[in-house]
Image (tube, rainbow, N blue to C red):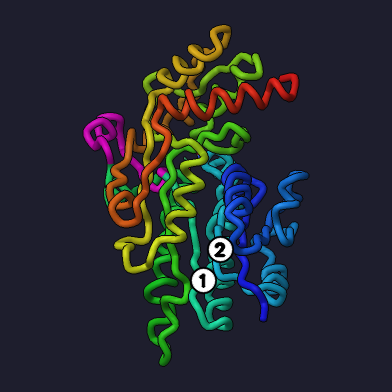
Amino acid sequence: MRKPVVLITGAGGEIGHGLIEQLAADGGRPIITLDLAPLEPGMNRMVAREFTGSIMDASLLEVIRSEFEVDTVFHLAALLSTRSEFSPLTAHEVNVGGTLNLLEFAQHEAESNGRPVTFLYPSSIAAYGLPSLEAKTAAGRVKEDEWTHPTTMYGCNKLYCEQLGEYYARHYKQLSAASLAGRVDFRAVRFPGLISAMTVPSGGTSDYAPEMIHAAAKGESYACFVRPDAQIPFMAMPDGVNALLKLAAAPKGALTQTAYNLGAFAPTADDVRTAVVAAFPTADITFTVDTKRQGIVDSWPADVDDSAARLDWGFAPEFDFARAFGDYLIPTIRQRYEGMGK
Ligand code: AKB
C-alpha cells in the first residue's frame, strides 16, 4: 500500500517556504514538491521527494502519479501580477494552463485511488477590479461576488481558475453516464498582499510593503512605487500559511463557497512607512510613483469582507497591523539580517 502524500507546486516560493516548515513540523503526511528550481538547502531535508520541473510538463506529472498517491495538492506555482503584465501569454499558459494540468492530475488521482483529492488554490485580491478611486472608496470592504472585473492578466487568470476549480468540484463531465464531479475537492482563498519576514517577493504589485521593510532592515534606501495613500489589505505570512492549512482541514460540509476572502489589516503605504521608520529610525524611504503599477493597486479593494471564512471554517488571523510589525516582522527580520551581517 502506498502512503498518501501532499504535493506542493511552486514549493520554493514565498508561501511554499512557510508551508513546508509548518507541514513538516506538524508531522502529518509526507511532502513531495514540484518547482522549476531546486529547493533551498535545509528545505529539501523536510520533504520526502523533490521534483525539479514544470507544471506544464504532463509527462512529469504522470511520473509523480505513478510513484505517489497524492491526496492533497497545494497548487502555489504562478507568475505574479507585475511579471504577468510583461508576458501575458506566458502568464496565461502558466497560471491557467498549469492549473488545468494540476486539476486534471487531481481528477485522475482521485478516480484511480477511489477518494477525493483536496485541492488548495491561492487566489488573490487581484481577482477584483474597481473602476475608479471613487468606486474603491465607496466600496469599502468588498464581498467575494462584488467587483470581480479584474484589469490584470494575473487577476483574470486567478478568477477564471477559481471557476475552473468549481467546475471540477461540481460539474465535471456533467453529461457522462457516471457522475465524475466532486472527486476534486477544490478550495480557494483570495489572499491579500502577503508579507514574510523570511523572503522578499518578486514579480508582484503588492511587493512595495515587504520591499520597504526588508530594505530598511538591510540599511538600503527604498523608493516606494505607489502613493502614500495607496491602500490594499495585507497579511503576515504565518497567518496565510495557517489559513491554507485550516481550510484544508475544514469539514467539507461546513464550506458554503469555493473561494474565500482573507483579510488581516489594511494599511496605507504611508502607514507601512511610519511603522518601518519607528523600528529603523535611519530608514531612507521615499515615494516615486509608478503611475502604471499605482493603477493596478488602485483597482484592488482597500479592504475585504472575510466574514464567510471566519464563519465557515474559523479563519482568525493572529496578527493585526501592530502585532504583525511588533511581534513578527521587525524582530524576525532584524535577527535575520543581523545574522547575515546585513
Ligand atoms: C501580487 O501583487 O501579484 C500578489 C497578489 C496581491 O496577489 N502578491
Evaluate whether residue 254 shows in this view: yes
Q: CA distance from mark 2 to mark 1?
A: 7 Å
For residue 222, which quarter of the picture? Answer: top right
> Residue 213 at x, y = what percent?
55, 23
Residue 43 — which label? Answer: none
> Residue 306 at x, y = what percent?
31, 46
Q: Give the residue displayed 61% in from the left and 20% down from the top.
A: 215
Q: Is residue 288 left or right of residue 192?
A: right
Please rate how many residues cluster around mark 2, counting C-alpha atoms within 10 Å: few if below 14, some from 14 to 19, many from 20: many
Q: Is residue 127 magenta?
A: yes
Contact (CB < 8 A) between labels 2 and 1?
yes
Q: Where the N terminus falls, by quadrant?
A: bottom right
Q: Which element carries disc 1, helix, strand or loop?
A: strand
Q: Which residue bears the numbered disc 1?
A: 117
> Residue 82 at x, y = what percent?
54, 38
For residue 203, which quarter of the picture? Answer: top right
Residue 73 — which label? Answer: 2
> Residue 252 at x, y = what percent?
37, 67
Q: Which residues are magenta?
A: 125-141
Q: Is residue 312 above or below residue 238?
A: below
Please rate how many residues cluster around mark 1, counting C-alpha atoms within 10 Å: few if below 14, some from 14 to 19, many from 20: many
